[in-house]
Protein backbone atom coordinates (compact mmCIF):
# COMPACT_ATOMS: atom_id res chain seq x y z
CA UNK A 1 0.00 0.00 0.00
CA UNK A 2 1.11 3.61 -0.65
CA UNK A 3 3.46 5.14 0.51
CA UNK A 4 5.73 2.06 0.83
CA UNK A 5 4.44 0.82 -2.50
CA UNK A 6 5.26 3.10 -5.44
CA UNK A 7 4.76 1.57 -8.88
CA UNK A 8 6.48 4.54 -10.50
CA UNK A 9 9.85 3.35 -9.09
CA UNK A 10 10.11 0.73 -11.80
CA UNK A 11 9.40 3.31 -14.50
CA UNK A 12 12.22 5.68 -13.59
CA UNK A 13 14.36 5.28 -16.69
CA UNK A 14 14.59 3.34 -19.94
CA UNK A 15 16.82 0.55 -18.59
CA UNK A 16 14.53 0.06 -15.62
CA UNK A 17 11.44 -0.04 -17.83
CA UNK A 18 13.06 -2.57 -20.16
CA UNK A 19 14.20 -4.72 -17.24
CA UNK A 20 10.62 -5.24 -16.09
CA UNK A 21 9.00 -5.31 -19.53
CA UNK A 22 6.64 -8.30 -19.82
CA UNK A 23 6.32 -8.50 -23.59
CA UNK A 24 8.82 -8.02 -26.37
CA UNK A 25 8.59 -8.02 -30.12
CA UNK A 26 11.06 -10.22 -31.96
CA UNK A 27 11.29 -9.91 -35.74
CA UNK A 28 11.95 -13.67 -35.85
CA UNK A 29 8.35 -14.12 -34.62
CA UNK A 30 6.92 -11.92 -37.34
CA UNK A 31 5.87 -12.68 -40.90
CA UNK A 32 5.73 -10.30 -43.88
CA UNK A 33 2.92 -10.95 -46.40
CA UNK A 34 4.04 -10.66 -50.05
CA UNK A 35 1.93 -10.51 -53.24
CA UNK A 36 3.30 -11.92 -56.49
CA UNK A 37 1.31 -11.10 -59.63
CA UNK A 38 1.91 -13.13 -62.77
CA UNK A 39 0.60 -10.31 -64.99
CA UNK A 40 3.29 -7.85 -63.93
CA UNK A 41 6.75 -7.32 -65.36
CA UNK A 42 7.82 -5.01 -62.53
CA UNK A 43 6.61 -4.14 -59.06
CA UNK A 44 3.49 -2.02 -58.75
CA UNK A 45 2.09 0.10 -55.91
CA UNK A 46 -1.11 -1.17 -54.35
CA UNK A 47 -3.60 1.72 -54.34
CA UNK A 48 -5.46 0.48 -51.26
CA UNK A 49 -2.36 -0.28 -49.15
CA UNK A 50 0.11 2.61 -48.97
CA UNK A 51 3.72 1.49 -49.12
CA UNK A 52 2.91 -2.11 -50.13
CA UNK A 53 3.62 -3.49 -53.61
CA UNK A 54 2.53 -6.28 -55.85
CA UNK A 55 5.66 -7.93 -57.17
CA UNK A 56 6.53 -9.56 -60.45
CA UNK A 57 8.69 -12.69 -60.41
CA UNK A 58 11.51 -10.38 -61.48
CA UNK A 59 11.11 -7.69 -58.86
CA UNK A 60 10.61 -10.36 -56.19
CA UNK A 61 14.30 -11.26 -56.40
CA UNK A 62 15.56 -7.88 -55.26
CA UNK A 63 12.76 -7.67 -52.72
CA UNK A 64 13.68 -11.04 -51.21
CA UNK A 65 17.29 -9.91 -50.93
CA UNK A 66 16.13 -6.69 -49.25
CA UNK A 67 14.00 -8.57 -46.69
CA UNK A 68 16.90 -10.89 -45.96
CA UNK A 69 19.16 -7.90 -45.41
CA UNK A 70 16.64 -6.51 -42.90
CA UNK A 71 16.72 -9.74 -40.90
CA UNK A 72 13.21 -10.85 -41.84
CA UNK A 73 12.92 -14.62 -41.48
CA UNK A 74 9.48 -15.41 -42.86
CA UNK A 75 7.14 -14.37 -45.66
CA UNK A 76 3.53 -15.35 -46.32
CA UNK A 77 3.13 -15.65 -50.09
CA UNK A 78 0.04 -14.87 -52.13
CA UNK A 79 0.04 -15.71 -55.83
CA UNK A 80 -2.13 -13.87 -58.35
CA UNK A 81 -2.43 -15.84 -61.60
CA UNK A 82 -2.82 -14.38 -65.08
CA UNK A 83 -5.59 -16.84 -65.92
CA UNK A 84 -8.56 -17.53 -63.65
CA UNK A 85 -11.23 -20.20 -64.21
CA UNK A 86 -14.24 -21.56 -62.33
CA UNK A 87 -12.15 -24.41 -60.82
CA UNK A 88 -9.16 -22.24 -59.88
CA UNK A 89 -6.95 -24.74 -61.66
CA UNK A 90 -3.91 -22.44 -61.79
CA UNK A 91 -3.62 -22.94 -58.03
CA UNK A 92 -2.18 -26.42 -58.54
CA UNK A 93 -0.27 -25.78 -61.75
CA UNK A 94 3.25 -26.95 -60.95
CA UNK A 95 4.49 -24.02 -63.03
CA UNK A 96 1.99 -21.62 -61.46
CA UNK A 97 2.75 -18.22 -59.99
CA UNK A 98 3.09 -19.17 -56.32
CA UNK A 99 5.03 -22.35 -57.20
CA UNK A 100 7.55 -20.26 -59.11
CA UNK A 101 7.73 -17.58 -56.43
CA UNK A 102 8.56 -19.95 -53.54
CA UNK A 103 12.18 -20.72 -54.57
CA UNK A 104 13.00 -17.02 -55.00
CA UNK A 105 12.61 -16.51 -51.26
CA UNK A 106 13.88 -19.92 -50.17
CA UNK A 107 17.10 -19.55 -52.13
CA UNK A 108 17.82 -16.39 -50.18
CA UNK A 109 17.33 -18.10 -46.85
CA UNK A 110 13.86 -16.79 -46.09
CA UNK A 111 11.22 -19.19 -44.76
CA UNK A 112 8.14 -19.44 -46.95
CA UNK A 113 4.56 -19.91 -45.80
CA UNK A 114 2.17 -20.33 -48.72
CA UNK A 115 -1.39 -19.10 -48.34
CA UNK A 116 -3.61 -21.87 -49.64
CA UNK A 117 -6.90 -20.60 -50.97
CA UNK A 118 -8.69 -20.40 -54.28
CA UNK A 119 -10.20 -16.89 -54.26
CA UNK A 120 -7.21 -15.43 -56.13
CA UNK A 121 -7.51 -18.24 -58.69
CA UNK A 122 -11.24 -18.57 -59.36
CA UNK A 123 -13.07 -16.45 -61.96
CA UNK A 124 -15.90 -15.89 -59.43
CA UNK A 125 -13.57 -14.94 -56.55
CA UNK A 126 -14.95 -17.45 -54.04
CA UNK A 127 -12.62 -19.55 -51.91
CA UNK A 128 -13.67 -22.86 -53.43
CA UNK A 129 -15.57 -24.63 -56.16
CA UNK A 130 -19.22 -23.70 -56.68
CA UNK A 131 -22.28 -25.88 -56.92
CA UNK A 132 -24.88 -23.34 -57.97
CA UNK A 133 -24.19 -20.38 -55.76
CA UNK A 134 -22.88 -22.45 -52.85
CA UNK A 135 -19.23 -23.26 -52.30
CA UNK A 136 -19.16 -27.06 -52.28
CA UNK A 137 -17.24 -28.11 -49.19
CA UNK A 138 -16.10 -31.66 -49.93
CA UNK A 139 -15.13 -31.11 -53.54
CA UNK A 140 -13.21 -28.01 -52.50
CA UNK A 141 -11.18 -29.66 -49.74
CA UNK A 142 -9.97 -32.34 -52.12
CA UNK A 143 -8.75 -29.62 -54.44
CA UNK A 144 -7.04 -27.95 -51.46
CA UNK A 145 -5.19 -31.25 -50.89
CA UNK A 146 -3.94 -31.15 -54.44
CA UNK A 147 -2.86 -27.51 -54.11
CA UNK A 148 -1.03 -28.29 -50.85
CA UNK A 149 1.03 -30.99 -52.55
CA UNK A 150 1.99 -28.71 -55.42
CA UNK A 151 3.00 -25.95 -52.98
CA UNK A 152 5.07 -28.41 -50.96
CA UNK A 153 6.69 -29.67 -54.16
CA UNK A 154 7.76 -26.13 -54.97
CA UNK A 155 9.55 -25.99 -51.61
CA UNK A 156 7.08 -24.25 -49.27
CA UNK A 157 8.16 -24.62 -45.63
CA UNK A 158 4.65 -24.25 -44.18
CA UNK A 159 1.19 -24.59 -45.78
CA UNK A 160 -1.46 -22.15 -44.54
CA UNK A 161 -5.02 -22.97 -45.64
CA UNK A 162 -7.28 -19.90 -45.38
CA UNK A 163 -10.50 -20.98 -47.05
CA UNK A 164 -12.48 -21.93 -43.91
CA UNK A 165 -13.86 -25.17 -45.38
CA UNK A 166 -14.73 -27.94 -42.91
CA UNK A 167 -12.14 -30.69 -42.88
CA UNK A 168 -9.55 -28.75 -44.86
CA UNK A 169 -6.74 -29.49 -42.42
CA UNK A 170 -7.51 -33.23 -42.39
CA UNK A 171 -7.58 -33.46 -46.18
CA UNK A 172 -4.44 -31.41 -46.63
CA UNK A 173 -2.60 -33.51 -44.02
CA UNK A 174 -3.70 -36.70 -45.83
CA UNK A 175 -2.56 -35.46 -49.24
CA UNK A 176 0.76 -34.19 -47.89
CA UNK A 177 1.48 -37.44 -46.04
CA UNK A 178 0.72 -39.72 -48.94
CA UNK A 179 2.98 -37.62 -51.17
CA UNK A 180 5.97 -37.84 -48.84
CA UNK A 181 5.56 -34.41 -47.24
CA UNK A 182 4.87 -35.67 -43.73
CA UNK A 183 7.33 -33.11 -42.36
CA UNK A 184 5.62 -30.06 -43.86
CA UNK A 185 3.62 -28.30 -41.12
CA UNK A 186 0.12 -26.89 -41.53
CA UNK A 187 -0.58 -23.42 -40.14
CA UNK A 188 -4.36 -23.39 -40.02
CA UNK A 189 -6.34 -20.20 -40.40
CA UNK A 190 -8.65 -21.66 -37.75
CA UNK A 191 -10.82 -18.76 -36.67
CA UNK A 192 -11.08 -16.50 -39.67
CA UNK A 193 -13.88 -14.00 -39.38
CA UNK A 194 -15.94 -12.58 -42.21
CA UNK A 195 -14.47 -9.09 -41.78
CA UNK A 196 -14.70 -5.70 -43.47
CA UNK A 197 -11.03 -5.33 -42.64
CA UNK A 198 -10.07 -7.49 -45.67
CA UNK A 199 -11.19 -4.75 -48.10
CA UNK A 200 -7.72 -3.42 -49.04
CA UNK A 201 -6.37 -6.97 -49.48
CA UNK A 202 -8.99 -7.89 -52.04
CA UNK A 203 -7.74 -5.16 -54.32
CA UNK A 204 -4.14 -6.28 -53.73
CA UNK A 205 -4.92 -9.94 -54.42
CA UNK A 206 -7.66 -9.32 -57.03
CA UNK A 207 -9.80 -11.72 -55.03
CA UNK A 208 -13.12 -9.96 -54.33
CA UNK A 209 -16.10 -12.29 -54.83
CA UNK A 210 -18.06 -11.39 -57.98
CA UNK A 211 -21.38 -12.10 -56.20
CA UNK A 212 -22.49 -12.58 -52.62
CA UNK A 213 -20.04 -12.65 -49.73
CA UNK A 214 -18.05 -15.16 -47.69
CA UNK A 215 -20.46 -15.53 -44.78
CA UNK A 216 -21.32 -19.16 -45.52
CA UNK A 217 -17.74 -20.14 -44.75
CA UNK A 218 -16.00 -17.38 -42.76
CA UNK A 219 -17.08 -16.77 -39.15
CA UNK A 220 -19.67 -14.37 -37.80
CA UNK A 221 -17.88 -11.58 -35.85
CA UNK A 222 -20.50 -11.98 -33.11
CA UNK A 223 -19.16 -15.39 -32.09
CA UNK A 224 -16.38 -16.15 -29.64
CA UNK A 225 -17.17 -19.67 -28.43
CA UNK A 226 -17.52 -20.85 -32.01
CA UNK A 227 -13.89 -19.83 -32.56
CA UNK A 228 -12.88 -22.34 -29.88
CA UNK A 229 -14.85 -25.03 -31.75
CA UNK A 230 -13.10 -24.13 -35.01
CA UNK A 231 -9.71 -24.37 -33.31
CA UNK A 232 -10.58 -27.65 -31.60
CA UNK A 233 -11.54 -29.12 -34.94
CA UNK A 234 -8.28 -28.03 -36.60
CA UNK A 235 -6.22 -29.32 -33.70
CA UNK A 236 -7.95 -32.71 -33.94
CA UNK A 237 -7.32 -32.78 -37.68
CA UNK A 238 -3.60 -32.31 -37.09
CA UNK A 239 -2.94 -28.56 -37.40
CA UNK A 240 0.58 -27.72 -36.21
CA UNK A 241 -0.22 -24.07 -35.58
CA UNK A 242 -3.51 -22.25 -35.19
CA UNK A 243 -4.45 -18.76 -36.31
CA UNK A 244 -6.88 -16.02 -35.36
CA UNK A 245 -7.69 -13.43 -38.00
CA UNK A 246 -8.09 -10.41 -37.93
CA UNK A 247 -6.11 -9.45 -34.82
CA UNK A 248 -6.86 -6.06 -33.30
CA UNK A 249 -10.66 -6.36 -33.13
CA UNK A 250 -10.30 -9.95 -31.91
CA UNK A 251 -7.82 -9.71 -29.03
CA UNK A 252 -10.34 -11.40 -26.73
CA UNK A 253 -10.34 -14.43 -29.02
CA UNK A 254 -6.54 -14.50 -29.04
CA UNK A 255 -6.52 -14.45 -25.24
CA UNK A 256 -9.12 -17.24 -24.98
CA UNK A 257 -7.21 -19.37 -27.47
CA UNK A 258 -3.96 -18.80 -25.56
CA UNK A 259 -5.60 -20.07 -22.38
CA UNK A 260 -7.23 -23.10 -23.99
CA UNK A 261 -4.62 -24.41 -26.44
CA UNK A 262 -0.91 -25.08 -26.29
CA UNK A 263 -0.25 -24.94 -30.03
CA UNK A 264 1.81 -22.06 -31.39
CA UNK A 265 -0.74 -19.30 -31.79
CA UNK A 266 -0.64 -17.03 -34.82
CA UNK A 267 -2.47 -13.72 -35.21
CA UNK A 268 -2.92 -12.04 -38.58
CA UNK A 269 -3.11 -8.27 -38.43
CA UNK A 270 -4.89 -7.76 -41.73
CA UNK A 271 -4.86 -5.19 -44.52
CA UNK A 272 -7.60 -2.99 -43.03
CA UNK A 273 -5.80 -2.77 -39.70
CA UNK A 274 -2.64 -1.77 -41.54
CA UNK A 275 -4.34 0.82 -43.70
CA UNK A 276 -6.30 2.45 -40.85
CA UNK A 277 -3.11 3.04 -38.91
CA UNK A 278 -1.10 3.97 -41.98
CA UNK A 279 -3.64 6.63 -43.03
CA UNK A 280 -3.69 8.11 -39.56
CA UNK A 281 0.14 8.16 -39.38
CA UNK A 282 0.61 9.58 -42.89
CA UNK A 283 -1.87 12.36 -42.15
CA UNK A 284 -0.18 13.01 -38.79
CA UNK A 285 -3.27 12.20 -36.73
CA UNK A 286 -1.29 9.51 -34.94
CA UNK A 287 2.37 9.20 -34.03
CA UNK A 288 4.31 6.38 -35.69
CA UNK A 289 4.80 4.76 -32.27
CA UNK A 290 1.27 3.37 -32.68
CA UNK A 291 2.83 0.65 -34.87
CA UNK A 292 4.87 -0.75 -31.96
CA UNK A 293 1.97 -0.32 -29.55
CA UNK A 294 -0.56 -2.14 -31.70
CA UNK A 295 1.85 -5.00 -32.42
CA UNK A 296 2.78 -5.26 -28.77
CA UNK A 297 -0.92 -5.53 -27.92
CA UNK A 298 -1.31 -8.54 -30.18
CA UNK A 299 1.66 -10.31 -28.58
CA UNK A 300 0.49 -9.32 -25.09
CA UNK A 301 -2.95 -10.79 -25.81
CA UNK A 302 -1.19 -14.13 -26.30
CA UNK A 303 0.03 -14.48 -29.88
CA UNK A 304 3.36 -16.26 -30.42
CA UNK A 305 3.61 -15.22 -34.05
CA UNK A 306 2.26 -12.09 -35.72
CA UNK A 307 1.66 -11.69 -39.45
CA UNK A 308 1.75 -7.97 -40.22
CA UNK A 309 2.24 -5.63 -43.17
CA UNK A 310 4.31 -3.48 -40.79
CA UNK A 311 6.94 -6.24 -40.42
CA UNK A 312 9.23 -4.74 -43.06
CA UNK A 313 8.98 -1.25 -41.57
CA UNK A 314 9.59 -2.54 -38.05
CA UNK A 315 12.64 -4.47 -39.18
CA UNK A 316 13.95 -1.32 -40.89
CA UNK A 317 13.53 0.69 -37.71
CA UNK A 318 15.40 -1.92 -35.68
CA UNK A 319 18.20 -2.02 -38.21
CA UNK A 320 18.56 1.79 -38.10
CA UNK A 321 18.79 1.68 -34.31
CA UNK A 322 21.48 -1.02 -34.31
CA UNK A 323 23.62 0.54 -37.11
C1 LIG B 1 -8.04 -15.33 -48.83
C2 LIG B 1 -7.43 -14.44 -47.84
C3 LIG B 1 -7.92 -13.19 -47.40
C4 LIG B 1 -6.94 -12.69 -46.54
C5 LIG B 1 -5.93 -13.64 -46.45
N1 LIG B 1 -6.26 -14.72 -47.26
C6 LIG B 1 -9.08 -12.38 -47.75
C7 LIG B 1 -10.44 -12.85 -47.81
O1 LIG B 1 -10.86 -13.78 -47.11
O2 LIG B 1 -11.15 -12.23 -48.60
C8 LIG B 1 -7.04 -11.36 -45.87
C9 LIG B 1 -5.76 -10.70 -45.60
C10 LIG B 1 -5.80 -9.25 -45.34
O3 LIG B 1 -6.85 -8.57 -45.36
O4 LIG B 1 -4.71 -8.74 -45.09
N2 LIG B 1 -8.78 -16.39 -48.36
ZN1 LIG C 1 -9.98 -17.25 -50.11
Image (spheres, grey):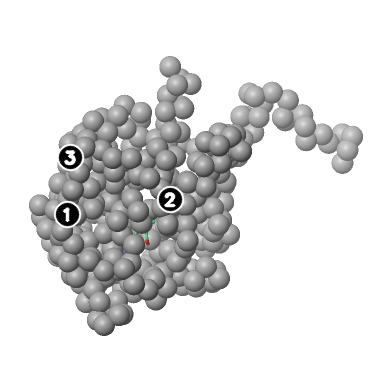
- Residue at horizontal 35%, vertical 34%? 72
Q: Residues within 10 Å of mark 3 (few under 14, many from 20)?
A: few
Q: Which residue is mark 2?
A: 271
In the figure, 277 relative to 152: above or below?
above
First reached walking from the N terminus: tag 1 or tag 3: 3
Residue 194 position in % (x across, y down): 45, 66
Q: Nearer the viewer, residue 157 or 209?
A: 209
Location of residue 250 by image quarter: bottom right
- Residue at horizontal 55%, vertical 37%? 283
First reached walking from the N terminus: tag 1 or tag 2: 1
Location of residue 209 by image quarter: bottom left
Q: Nearer the viewer, residue 9 or 126?
A: 126
Location of residue 129 by image quarter: bottom left
Q: Which residue is mark 3?
A: 41
Residue 265 position in % (x across, y down): 44, 54
Q: CA distance from mark 1 to mark 3?
A: 12 Å
Q: CA distance from mark 1 to mark 2?
A: 23 Å
Q: Quadrant of the C terminus?
A: top left
* Beta carbon at label 2 within 8 Å of ligand 1: yes
The nearer-to-camera label among 1 and 2 is 1
Q: Which residue is mark 1?
A: 82
Q: Nearer the viewer, residue 187 or 279?
A: 279
In the figure, 104 relative to 221: above or below?
above
- Residue at horizontal 29%, vertical 65%? 125
Amino acid sequence: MYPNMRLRRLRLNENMRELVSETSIGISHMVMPVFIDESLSDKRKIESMSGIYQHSLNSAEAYAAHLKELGIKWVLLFGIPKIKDAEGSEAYNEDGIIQRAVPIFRERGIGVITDLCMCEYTSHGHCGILKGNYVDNDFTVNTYGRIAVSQAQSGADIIAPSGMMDGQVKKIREYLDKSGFENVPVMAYSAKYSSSLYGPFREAAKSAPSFGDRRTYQMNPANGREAMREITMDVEEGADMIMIKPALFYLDIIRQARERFDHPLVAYSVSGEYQMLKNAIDRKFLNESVIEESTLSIFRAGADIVISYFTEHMAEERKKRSD
